[in-house]
Amino acid sequence: MSRLTTDYAHDFTRLAGFYNGNPADPNAWRESIARAQRQSRPRDGIAAVIAAQQRRRNAPPAAVAAAEQLRDPRAVAVVTGQQAGLFGGPLYTLLKAITALRLAARVREEHHVPAVALFWADGEDHDWEEVRSCCVLDAEAAVKAAALPPSAGASRPVGRVILDTTVDAALTELQAALPATEFSPQVFDTLKRIYRPGTGMSAPSRCSSKSCSGRWGWWSMNHRTRPPSRSSPISSRRRSPRPGPRPAAPSRREPRWNGPATTRR
């Protein structure tokens, strides 16, 4: 674990100069929420764009209802994301989703404002080597990898890579590596439905997020939708073990980190 992460979690005073509030301080949350609510945003337009994406993906009712809450001038959003990875990517991608959902629930409970969770599937990443494989533990706790060919997306953004029949081979590798459980049929039926030839690489990542957490009011945005840092009420990209409030946009004359986590790679 990096020193930045441990200081963020256990000795925030060392990092206070980089943030506009201590995530462990309820007052910092109140101030962040108030800042977001004071800013004028085209809320109806944002909600309409998200609703159109949800219709195309047959989003669960809870996710649709959550998106509609953004029309409320009191509403805030907890935003996170990850580049599109094979079979959903690393486990921490799902942990990000769960953290955002729980954080939004806590904001609703403690601050009595509508709060929703949003995931941005980043398809503009060019690091194909990082996203083309998925590692799991087999029945002997040995690391096994299922992977797509090394050259498929080497020269273009991941979101523009179209899956071919090699994804079927990768699914076969994954199924052979994992021990069978009572959950296996449903898991692999879902994976085969969303990871199929002719599908864009980032589309399955959004569907995976929806399948895992859409029932709890989660929705995801695709790589062609601009990250909502300027259009959503609160935007928070986290790579740390504890959540924190998203600070207001910094002045051009005052360079500061713009979120409660480490910078992206």
Image (cartoon, rainbow, N blue to C red):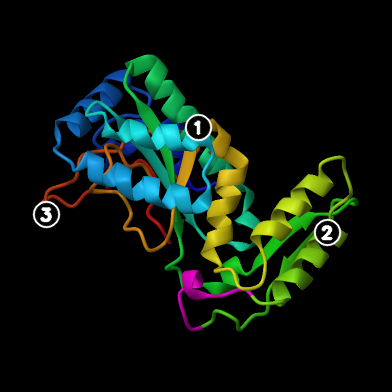
Residue type at mark 1?
Answer: Ala
Q: Earlier in the sequence, mark 2 or mark 3?
A: 2
Taking 197 as reference, is 44 left or right?
left
Q: Is residue 13 above or below residue 173?
A: above
Q: Earlier in the sequence, mark 2 or mark 1?
A: 1
The range drawn in magenta is: 155-163
Label 2: how many residues lie within 10 Å, few (<14), some (14-19) or many (20+)?
some
Inter-mark Cα distance, 2 to 3? 50 Å
Q: Quadrant of residue 216?
A: top right
- Residue beneath the point at 12% across and 49% down: 251
> How far from the left and from the top, in percent, is residue 172?
82, 66
> How far from the left and from the top, in percent, is residue 72?
26, 29
- Helix, strand or loop for disc 1: helix
Tag 3–tag 1 contact (CB < 8 Å): no
Residue type at mark 3?
Answer: Arg
Residue type at mark 2?
Answer: Gln
- Helix, strand or loop for disc 2: helix
Tag 2–tag 1 contact (CB < 8 Å): no
Inter-mark Cα distance, 2 to 1? 31 Å
Tag 2–tag 3 contact (CB < 8 Å): no
159 falls in the magenta region: yes
Q: Is residue 233 above or below residue 179?
A: above
Q: Is residue 191 above or below residue 239?
A: below
Dominant secondary structure (helix, strand or loop) of the stretch shown in magenta: loop
Instruction: Kindly identify which residue carries mark 3.
Output: 252
- Helix, strand or loop for disc 3: loop
> How far from the left and from the top, in percent, is residue 50?
37, 47
